[in-house]
Image (cartoon, rainbow, N blue to C red):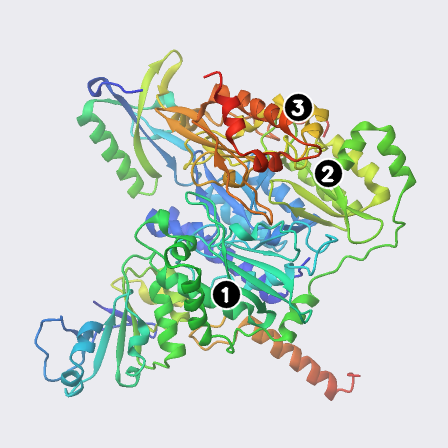
Amino acid sequence: MYKYDHFDQEFVDRRVTQFRDQVRRRLAGELSEDEFKPLRLHNGLYLQLHAYMLRVAIPYGTLSAAQMRALAHVARRYDRGYGHFTTRQNIQFNWIRLEEAPDALADLARVQMHAVQTSGNCIRNVTADQWAGVAPDEIEDPRIWCEIVRQWSSLHPEFTFLPRKFKIAITGSPNDRAAVRVHDIGLRMHRNAAGEVGFEVIVGGGLGRTPMIGKTIAEFLPKQDLLSYLEAVMRVYNLAGRRDNLYKARIKILVHEIGADEMRRRVEAEWENLRDGRLRLEPAVVADIESRFARPVYAGQPADSAEVAALKFRDKAFGRWMQANVVPHREPGYAIVNVSLKPEGEPPGDASAAQMDALADLADAHSLGEIRVSHAQNLVLPHVKLVDLPSVFRRLQEIGLAADNIGQIGDIIACPGLDFCALANARSIPVAQRISRHFADADLGHEIGDLQIKVSGCINACGHHHVGHIGILGVDKHGEEFYQITLGGSVESDASIGTIVGPAVSSADVVGAIDNIVRTYLDARQGEERFLDTVRRLGTTPFKERLYAAA
Amino acid sequence: MARPASSALRAATANRLRDGAVVFRTVTGGWSSRIEDAETAQGEAEAARLLAEAERDATNAVVVGPYLIDVEPGEDGLLPLSLRERIRAFGPTTPMVGVEALPYL
Amino acid sequence: MPLLKNGRIVGDAWQEIGDDAPLPSDGAIVVSLARFKAEPDRLAGRDGALGVRLRNTDDARALADHVGRLGLIVLEFPKYTDGRAYSQARILREELGYAGELRAAGNVLLDQLAFMQRCGIDAFDMARPDAELAWRKALGAFDAFYQPAGDGRATVFEQRQRRLFEQRAEATWSGTAG
């Protein structure tokens, strides 16, 4: 966990003061909505269907127990008692009042939290692998670099009025859990032939209206060059990104239009003027940031626990939960616990203030005070002793967060949709709830196995439906909600965009359609084949035929 | 659902500036969060007048982004025609975690 | 249009000359980049200072060999959402070493003054009566910045390094270093 120094604290405090004054001017009528809108967006405040929505940054998805308690406090004091964790590792509060937003931000600043640049046409939260620092397959912890990029991008005067929003993700593992190939800039840490660690720079990935996989423009960028190179990319984009059409303004469109080679050429030309200047990252600067990352202190633990093994056998629920939610840790005797925020039939990704407080206590007692936010609207307890797993499970059961469905059919990702979002064409949360209830049987969920359903309420694709194994896109057909289904998307290292399976189905038929697709899979799968692999092997035709056969 | 223009009944809606709440312009020129209090306009001329008044309130920092919606008289009061506007008027169709107290906490 | 320059509202001493208008024989004039490129000799041969107005689609580097003799460069912000001129400003100041007046014209919002100033812009088209107060408030909002820009300030990273260096030097002097 990064510890703020006085510069960092001063920054968030002054930002609150600045925003408080801007809100005062707006409420007094000194600022028009048009003048105020970029200011509130740069502080994470959207005007949605029912109220203002505040998106609080959780940098690279890492937060402390104290910070989680502060989020619970914001939910209680300023909202309706709950919050929603997002696919970009942030949290959203749906019912904030403009006149109270500065107070909420002041309360958050006290625990080193903020909402800076979580919206607007600027550089957004830099996201990372939710298992950074604890995954056994990790080459290096990417979060130091996320923090460096976060600071460099905060109130960057040149890049605050970009053509469009800009999202950066960093992975430190060969198994990409940060979806670097579908970000505006994705950075993949890896080793060169000499064993040094550097960055592969991938540009122009993204979802939304025109989903695209990013292109590599630098195979191996040395660490010292990270910021100067990013500055070069941003400057090329700021000057050349399209400004004539909102839907063609992301960097992915620029890369698509000029090609990866030309993009690389332009970036390198800009970089020539920047590379050995003030943005060069000296080892002392990196070491200084690193020194403020408090490292977990692990107590020597036996690698196995007979008690846990026996309980897995005796208690079926515990056994299923271990199997779906608990993954190996790089430290012997520890485990990574994924906490599903997808209880059966509930809105995905939501947690009540009481649940947040309980999770904070759980983190203090059993996870060295640390919690992570995943990319699937779930949470992670990253440092749990093997021997503590039974008590963690029991406590999660008590607070209603013990669903054993991580990565399974019940672990649905859904955007807020028409119930909350001003941009949506259709609702997504009720669809997720109905699918979740239909497949509620835990054994069935385990039987189906790895199956990621993602639901978006409009073409902006905040539910990432393009990269769902099953993607569901809500559309408006003559005032009625219809749902278009895609198959075979993936957000991992083997990133791919899903294929439309056929004409959109009505709201009444969508659960039946998913059931039909799942049965086709169960009938056709070979051995231990995952759903995604069956789709890739067979294509969408057998699914399409069976789905539309009765029509 | 198309309605013949001559029978179109409209109301003016917006979000209240200070708290973002969904509000409807009332006959007394105020803004209420209850759709049953909404002033309705019949025909283009009335609708244009209603919208102009609503927009003045936007300029005066009372509301944000006013616009007209189609409504019809229902059993218990006015009903917006579109799903989106019904959700705005009556709230999300999903239960809100934490609002109903969870019994085990 | 009145200007906000160095924190004060001042008058504009420069005259904008359109592409087809006759060139006055003296006085400070501003021409488009197109005209600047088309009539280098006529412009150089005049008495009086010369300025260029860049569209935000122009390549700022076209002025690379000429920055030494320009007294004014005007950058355009047609809509406040269009941030291309921030990059133009930094290229002119930091890469090309331009030292004359760098002015923001167009849709300049008070809450953008600090960003513009950091990019090296030192004059702003500003008709608002409260501009001087807004300037002081804008520049006072933060006093430490994470990233280098065209304003010459040390960054937070640099300040941290200086502090560490001082601490180490202090430790050496007082004999507490190893």
- Would you name the residue on which mark 3 appears? A440
Mark 1 neighbour class, 10 Å CA radius: few under 14, some 14 to 19, many 20 or more? some
The residue drawn where x is 54% and y is 52% is A181
The residue lying toward the viewer, choosing from A484 and A537, is: A537
Is A9 placed left or right of C29 in the picture?
right
The image position of residue A305, as x and y in percent, is 89, 42
Distance, label 1 to label 3, CA atoms, is: 45 Å
> Do the residues under discs 1 and 3 have CB atoms within 8 angstroms?
no
Quadrant in which the N terminus of chain A is drawn:
bottom right
Q: Which mark is residue A230?
A: 1
Mark 2 neighbour class, 10 Å CA radius: few under 14, some 14 to 19, many 20 or more? some
Judging from the image, mark 3 belongs to the subunit labelled: A
Q: Which mark is residue A187?
A: none
- Would you name the residue on which mark 2 appears? A325
> Mark 2 belongs to which amino acid?
Asn
Is A456 placed left or right of A257 in the picture?
right
Q: Is residue A218 above or below residue A94?
A: below
Secondary structure at badge 1 equals helix
To the question of a shared chain for discs 3 and 2, the answer is: yes
Q: Residue furthest top?
A: B75
> Mark 3 belongs to which amino acid?
Ala
Mark 3 neighbour class, 10 Å CA radius: few under 14, some 14 to 19, many 20 or more? some
To the question of a shared chain for discs 1 and 3, the answer is: yes
The residue lying toward the viewer, choosing from A203 and A371, is: A203
To the question of a shared chain for discs 2 and 1, the answer is: yes
> Mark 1 belongs to which amino acid?
Leu
The residue drawn where x is 63% and y is 27% is A524
Judging from the image, mark 1 belongs to the subunit labelled: A
Whether residue A493 appears in this view of the structure is yes
